[in-house]
Image (tube, rainbow, N blue to C red):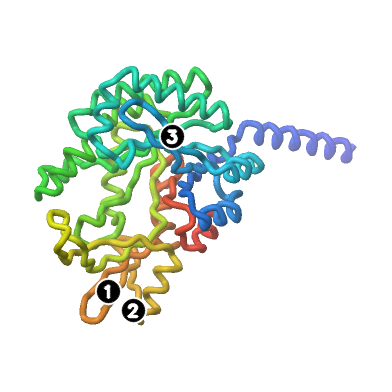
């Protein structure tokens, strides 16, 4: 009799456990998008780490004011992604981020239709998951036309089962206004205020928030994105866009600020000295430290390693995107329940980031 009761108890426990597993949802998979530039180092990195990637986003296509699209994706990337069930989502951008070109495109319904027809054909031909719009240098006055174009694009894409995403320039938050300098006012008007977050949050399948380019070649030296600046921008976007539609952008390249001596834009016959930035991969950044016997220091507030390099009496500034800074930004995904991350760009990364991801 004891054996019968024992068998019944085991059977009941098995049923309960099985039912429990059926009711428990598996944890949400973090989307891991990596941008891909057409370089051999990028392909080697993709080949080696393809199983850690869910979307590869080649920087592949351009469009002009007439809606004519050109470009291509390396066939090796398409084949490799297909073998590993990785989605391919190429980028399209206004050529050289030309504002006047983009304005003309947005104002021309025929040109927009031509672009969309071409993109849908490209996706069908290559079995792409969809397209990411990377339209930058968008003037504040083109806000509504840009939204309308995105709405039309989403409608057409969805008819064909395609995903439409957006590379979103990190916007200016209310706390950062009014702009304290002429440069920031120009940046606001021409780069950061042209995106209607509330409407785009409804239209787009997801957005890659480019939480970098806080400092660029035309600014004073600084990190691609300090942690307080990244978080402030993210919190602002989340007021308008659902968290499961946001992929946080994480830079993989390092920046070296140095003094350049170039021909003057106004008079090519003369030269002038000015500060500018050079993009480095992780290995090159380590080479700068070794060459000048410099030491990297961790900034706990900004979550970045940096070094001041004495180059024959002139100070140069190196900001390193390494696994430690990557991990700090990656933690934002879980903290804010985001869709995942969008890493820019393959081939420049600290090899240790792959351990962080795993």
The image quadrant that residue 316 belongs to is bottom left
Few, some or many residues within 10 Å of mark 3 (<14, 14–19, 20+): some
Circles 2 and 1: CB atoms closer than 8 Å? yes
> Left of 210 or right of it: where is 355?
right
Residue that carries the numbered disc 2 in the rendered image: 294
Q: Secondary structure at mark 1?
A: strand
Viewer-proximal residue among 337 and 194: 194
The span from disc 2 to disc 1 (Cα, nearest Å) is 7 Å
> Left of 116 or right of it: where is 8?
right
The image quadrant that residue 236 belongs to is top left
Of badges 3 and 1, the one in the foreground is 3
Residue that carries the numbered disc 3 in the rendered image: 70
Considering every residue shown, the one lying at the far front of the view is 269
Which of the numbered marks, if any, corresponds to residue 308?
1
User: Looking at the picture, does residue 9 appear above or below residue 217?
Assistant: above
Quadrant of the rendering where the C terminus is positioned: bottom right
- Of callouts 2 and 3, which one flags the residue occurring earlier in the amino acid sequence? 3
Residue 164, image x, y percentages: 44, 29
User: Looking at the picture, does residue 229 appear above or below residue 315?
Assistant: above
The image quadrant that residue 191 belongs to is top left
- Of callouts 3 and 1, which one flags the residue occurring earlier in the amino acid sequence? 3
The residue located at (44%, 19%) in the rendering is: 156
Residue 174, image x, y percentages: 17, 40
Residue 34, image x, y percentages: 48, 47
- Of callouts 2 and 1, which one flags the residue occurring earlier in the amino acid sequence? 2
Q: Secondary structure at mark 3?
A: strand
The span from disc 2 to disc 3 (Cα, nearest Å) is 44 Å
Few, some or many residues within 10 Å of mark 1 (<14, 14–19, 20+): some
């Amino acid at each position: 009799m004891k054996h019968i009761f024992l068998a019944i108890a085991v059977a009941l426990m098995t049923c309960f456990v099985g039912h429990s597993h059926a009711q428990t949802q598996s944890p949400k998979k973090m989307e891991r998008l990596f941008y891909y530039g057409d370089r051999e180092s990028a392909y080697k990195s993709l080949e080696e780490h393809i199983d850690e990637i869910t979307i590869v986003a080649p920087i592949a296509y351009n469009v002009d004011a007439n809606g004519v699209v050109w470009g291509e994706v390396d066939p090796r990337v398409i084949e490799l992604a297909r073998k590993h069930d990785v989605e391919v989502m190429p980028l399209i951008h206004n050529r050289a981020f030309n504002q006047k070109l983009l304005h003309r495109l947005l104002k021309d319904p025929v040109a927009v239709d031509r672009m969309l027809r071409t993109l849908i054909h490209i996706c069908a031909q290559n079995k792409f998951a969809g397209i990411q719009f990377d339209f930058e240098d968008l003037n504040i006055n083109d806000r509504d036309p840009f939204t309308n174009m995105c709405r039309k694009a989403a409608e057409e894409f969805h008819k064909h089962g395609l995903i439409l995403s957006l590379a979103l320039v990190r916007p200016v938050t209310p706390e950062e206004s009014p702009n304290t300098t002429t440069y920031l006012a120009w940046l606001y008007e021409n780069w950061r205020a042209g995106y209607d977050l509330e409407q785009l949050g409804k239209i787009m399948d997801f957005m890659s928030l480019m939480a970098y380019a806080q400092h660029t070649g035309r600014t004073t030296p600084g990190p691609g994105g300090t942690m307080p600046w990244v978080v402030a921008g993210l919190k602002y976007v989340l007021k308008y866009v659902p968290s499961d539609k946001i992929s946080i952008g994480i830079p993989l390249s390092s920046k070296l600020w140095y003094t350049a001596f170039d021909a003057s834009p106004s008079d090519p016959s003369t030269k002038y000295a000015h500060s500018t930035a050079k993009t480095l991969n992780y290995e090159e950044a380590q080479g700068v430290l070794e060459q000048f016997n410099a030491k990297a220091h961790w900034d706990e507030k900004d979550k970045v390693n940096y070094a001041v390099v004495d180059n024959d009496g002139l100070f140069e500034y190196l900001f390193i995107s390494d696994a430690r800074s990557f991990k700090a930004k990656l933690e934002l995904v879980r903290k804010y329940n985001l869709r995942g991350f969008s890493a820019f760009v393959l081939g420049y990364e600290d090899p240790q980031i792959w351990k962080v991801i795993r």
